[in-house]
Structure formats: C-alpha cells, structure tokens
Image: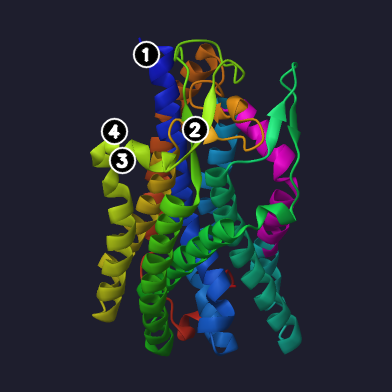
Amino acid sequence: MIDYESLRIIWWVLIGVLLIGFAVTDGFDLGVGALLTLVGRTDQERRVMINTIGPHWDGNQVWLVTAGGALFAAWPLIYAAAFSGFYVALALTLIALWMRPLGFDYRSKLTNPTWRKSWDWALFAGGLVPTLIFGVAFGNLLLGVPFEYDNMLKPTYSGSFWGLLTPFAILCGLVSVAMILNHGSVWLQLKTDGNLLNRSRSVSVILSVATAVLFSLAGVYLALGVDGYVITSEIDTFATSNPMKKEVIIESGAWLQNYSKYPWMIIAPILGIAGALACAALSKVNRSGFAFVASALSIAGIILTAGFSMFPFLMPSSTVPAVSLTVWDATSSYLTLKIMFGVACVLVPVILAYTTYSFYVMRGRIKEADLNQSHTIY
C-alpha cells in the first residue's frame, strides 16, 4: 500500500517524466517548424522538412495532452492558479499550436508561392511561440507568481501579461528556444540528406553551444539575482491539501539549497550543459544518432534542474509567500492520486510502446525524390 506522502512524490516525478517526454518528442517537431524558413531554402526542401515530422507530430502531442490532463487531476490548485494568471499566454500558445495542423494540411494544397510562404511563416510561429512561452513560464515560476487566496481558496492574480516578461524570464525563454530548435536541427540531421543535412548540422553546432551558454547564464542569474523560497514551519506531508497552513520566507540563494542537501541533484545541470556540448561535438563529426541522444539528455537535464531547484515548491506566490503551492499542499485527494497512479502504470508504458513502434516503422531519410511517391505526402 502506497501512503499519501509517497503518492505526492510519485506524481511530482510522473509529471516531470511527462513534461520531459513532451519536450523530447514534440520538441523536435516544434523545432523543425521554427527552423522551416531558416534551414529550408527552397519549396522542395521545406516540404522535405515538413514530411520528416509529418508521421509523428500529432502522436507526439499525446505527451502534452497527457501532461495537461495529469496536471489538472493531480494538482488542481496549480491548474486553477496557472490559468488565472497565464491565460493570455496560454491563449497565444493554443493559437500558435493551431497553426501546425492547419499548415501541415493546407500548405501543399495549392502551388501558389505566396500561399505556401504564408503557411511557412505560420508553421514558424507554431513552433517558436509555444517554445518561447513555455520557457518564459518556467522563468516566472522560479521568480514567483503574483497570486493569493481568499478564505474560500479562490485564487486572485494581480499581475499582467507584460509583467511576465522580466529579464530573467526572457532569458529562460531564450534557453527554451535554443534547446528546442537545436533538437529540431538534430532531428533533421537524422532524416534528411544533401544540402539540407549539411545546413542542419551547421545550425545544430551553433544552437547546441548557444543552449549551453544561455543555460549557464540562467544558472548564474538564478544564483546571484533571483531570490528563492523556503518553508519555515513544520509540514504534515500526509495532511489534506491546504496551502494556507504554512509559513514561507523569501531568501537569497534559496533555490540552491537542495543541491547542498542532496548533492546528487547536481547531475541535472551538468547533464544540461554537457549534453548540449556533446551534441555540438557529435554533430560536427556527423554522428547524428548520438547527437540526438545527447540533445535529449540535455533537455532532460535542463527541465530537471528547474524541478530540483524549486522542490517542494510548484508555484511560489510573490505577493503572499505563505500561500505558495507545494507538493504537500496542492495535490488531489489520496484516493484520486491512487486511482490515477494505477491508470498511469498502464497508459504510460502503452504510450512509450506505440511511440517507439511508430518511430521504428517510419525510420529512414526523406529525400526530395520521395515527395511524389505517395498521396499522403504533405
């Protein structure tokens, strides 16, 4: 029998796994979309790029849908507070994501160059905007979000959309953009040939180094310029969720304390930097498969660094720190977490299995000559 405290930790881990799964799988097709006008020089090259992700992009979004559903069910207070504060950003994300299926389906329906270029820019926005917003959102979580609760646990957000665009949050957004575009360029190395392959390799070397540099800068900024949050009262980790029964202070350097308590956590930032640099080196020597693995490890390291730095906080409040949401007071009931855990034990392996199978079936490079071989080609 798993107790309530353990289930809360398990769901913190599971949602982290789902977010990493989304970034690794859907990340490369977001990256390819954002690189469409940079790497693809001709209409045929851009069609090749689109067709490298054509069989996978919709299946990859299952990770995003699953992570969103799990977030709603496991951490309902986080879901409510986030949608109260970030609804403009989330609406922009959804609009940008809509551009992808529309672009994939309609771009090649007409041969008019203006029509196709318009959809190319729509796909560019569909890849870049969500990537940037996700990074900015993580930056704001580390800074603290201006929300509070009344006596009925109704959240009130006192910030604005433009208030989310602080220097640190924008830096986190740039880390996200470099990381995901790099993942897309490594994917293109695996799936294309000729000039497209060579161009993707050159872009990947630059973006990998940019990811390592920007992530390092964000780490220095976090250590020296961002105050963290510390729980100063006793916490009953088995108690019913209530974010108003603790004391929290804001303290300089608090986001680094977990690395002193649990030194093994340092592997996350090391993986984020070393993975990106290894990806650059492997792309340079044309070892695309290993470069993709290195890029995926870098993504996992960067996301884990954010999670490890904040634990047990999930969404700190910058206006009333005491009502910050944590792993111990933002979760659903014990019964809900237990039932969801059983469902996850069945469905997550299923998602992993069919994702792996689809990548195996669709293996191989896409060439310009292949574009006229099937009516299903975009």
Mark 2 and mark 3 lie on one chain; the one further toward the N terminus is 3
Circle 4 residue:
261
Specify whether 187 is left or right of 48. left
Tell me if mark 4 has few (under 14), some (14-19) or many (20+) residues whose alpha carbon lies within 10 angstroms of its own.
few
Mark 2 and mark 4 lie on one chain; the one further toward the N terminus is 4
Depth order, front residue of 183/319: 319
Q: Which secondary structure lies at badge 3?
A: helix
Q: Which secondary structure lies at badge 1?
A: loop
Mark 1 and mark 2 lie on one chain; the one further toward the N terminus is 1
Depth order, front residue of 338/314: 314
Between the residue at mark 2 and the residue at mark 4, the CA separation in whole angstroms equals 15 Å
The x and y percentages for residue 73 are: 59, 27
Q: From the viewer's perspective, is the residue at label 2 or at label 4 nearer?
A: 4
Question: Where on the picture, by quarter, is residue 8?
Answer: top left
Q: Is residue 96 magenta?
A: yes
> On residue 313, which mark appears?
2
> On residue 295, which mark appears?
none
Question: Where on the picture, by quarter, is residue 189?
Answer: bottom left
Circle 1 residue:
2
Q: Which residues are magenta?
A: 75-99
Question: Where on the picture, by quarter, is residue 135?
Answer: bottom right
Q: Is residue 341 magenta?
A: no
Quarter that holds the N terminus? top left
Main SS category, magenta section: helix
The x and y percentages for residue 126 are: 64, 65
Mark 3 and mark 1 lie on one chain; the one further toward the N terminus is 1
Mark 4 and mark 1 lie on one chain; the one further toward the N terminus is 1
Q: Which secondary structure lies at badge 2?
A: strand
Residue kind at label 2, given as amino acid type: Phe
Circle 3 residue:
259
Camera sees residue 365: no
Q: Are marks 2 and 3 in contact (CB under 8 Å)?
A: no
